[in-house]
Amino acid sequence: MSSGIKHTEIITEAAEKIIHAKHLVAFTGAGISVESGIPSFRGEDGLWNRYNPKTLEIEYFIQHPELCWPVIKEIFYTHFNKARPNAAHRLLAHLEEKGILKATITQNIDSLHQQAGSKTVHCFHGNSARLTCLKCGTFYPANNEFLSQAVPHCMQCNGILKPDFIFFGEAIPGEAYQLSFEAARQCDVLLIIGTTGEVYPAALIPQEAKAHGAFIIEINPQQSNFSFQTTLLQIPMKAGEAAQAIASYLKLKID
């Protein structure tokens, strides 16, 4: 059997599981955004081979915001602002619009799901689209008014602002944690896209879904920590390529 035929059979099975799901949930990681031009943090070409991870340690940031903010701007607001949703983001938004997909749980902080049109997105690690004051907790949009400052400060109390995503040493936001695990327990099909399963506690979400009877589909060109013990159907393709194939089978227009 050729790999092309095998992939066709896998896509068919995955698409049928998706379209007949009573409560479909998606769980996404860095791999879904690589095709949008956002590099991953880990691996041979990861950002941590070019930048010091210490930049995103909360204690270091508090002590040295003037050193951290230039790097943060370069990584998260220069690189990220050039990125646009790809076919995988658009497929999930389309499935949600059709009422098939109930929620997307993402480890990503790039807002590409929202830009694609997804409404119910649980941002497990926070989001780069807004800033938060470390002193009073006020939120601000991450726009040029603040990003043009060497170190952005709060307009209410003059406290230091940081991006509203999780730094090393910070806890997962309580609401995002609760909603994500609740969605995992409710789903009958979980679609994993582009995550290695190396980051905890996020990596526990697919395990939670499977423990409650969900069928686990994984889209990843490489095998992940989920591939052997959690995944029930592996699609060994890039996120956008697999999304196009699934959309084609389901006769959905996602361009």
Image (spheres, rainbow, N blue to C red):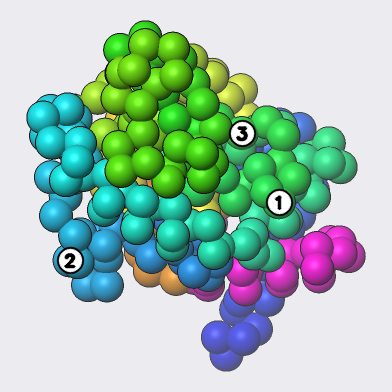
Q: Secondary structure at mark 3?
A: strand
Which amino acid type is shown beneath numbered disc 3? Val
Provide the residue designation for mark 2: 49
Does the residue at mark 2 contact the one at mark 1 (Cβ under 8 Å)?
no
Q: Is residue 43 left or right of residue 181?
A: left
Please indicate, yes or no, whether residue 75 appears anywhere in the rendered image: yes
Q: Residue 248, relative to residue 63: is it above or below?
A: below
Residue at horizontal 27%, vertical 51%? 70
In terms of depth relative to the viewer, which is nearer, 2 or 25? 25
Which residue is outermost to the bottom? 2
Q: Magenta stretch: residue 82 in it?
A: no
Q: Secondary structure at mark 1?
A: helix
Q: Is residue 41 left or right of residue 244?
A: left
Distance between the Cα atoms at labels 1 and 3?
11 Å
Provide the residue designation for mark 3: 121
Residue at horizontal 68%, vertical 31%? 120
Q: Secondary structure at mark 2?
A: helix
* Residue 245, horizontal then vertical, whole percent: 71, 71
Which amino acid type is shown beneath numbered disc 1? Ala
Q: Earlier in the sequence, mark 2 or mark 1?
A: 2
Does the residue at mark 1 contact the one at mark 3 (Cβ under 8 Å)?
no
Provide the residue designation for mark 1: 116
Distance between the Cα atoms at labels 2 and 1?
29 Å
Q: Earlier in the sequence, mark 1 or mark 3?
A: 1
Q: Quadrant of residue 252?
A: bottom right
Q: Is residue 99 left or right of residue 182?
A: right
Q: Is residue 82 left or right of residue 23?
A: left
Which amino acid type is shown beneath numbered disc 2? Asn
Q: How would you rate the neighbour count of disc 2 (Cα within 10 Å): few for under 14, some for 14-19, many for 20 or more?
A: few
Q: Which residues are magenta?
A: 231-255
The mark found on residue 82 in the picture is: none
* Residue 90, horizontal then vertical, whole percent: 72, 56
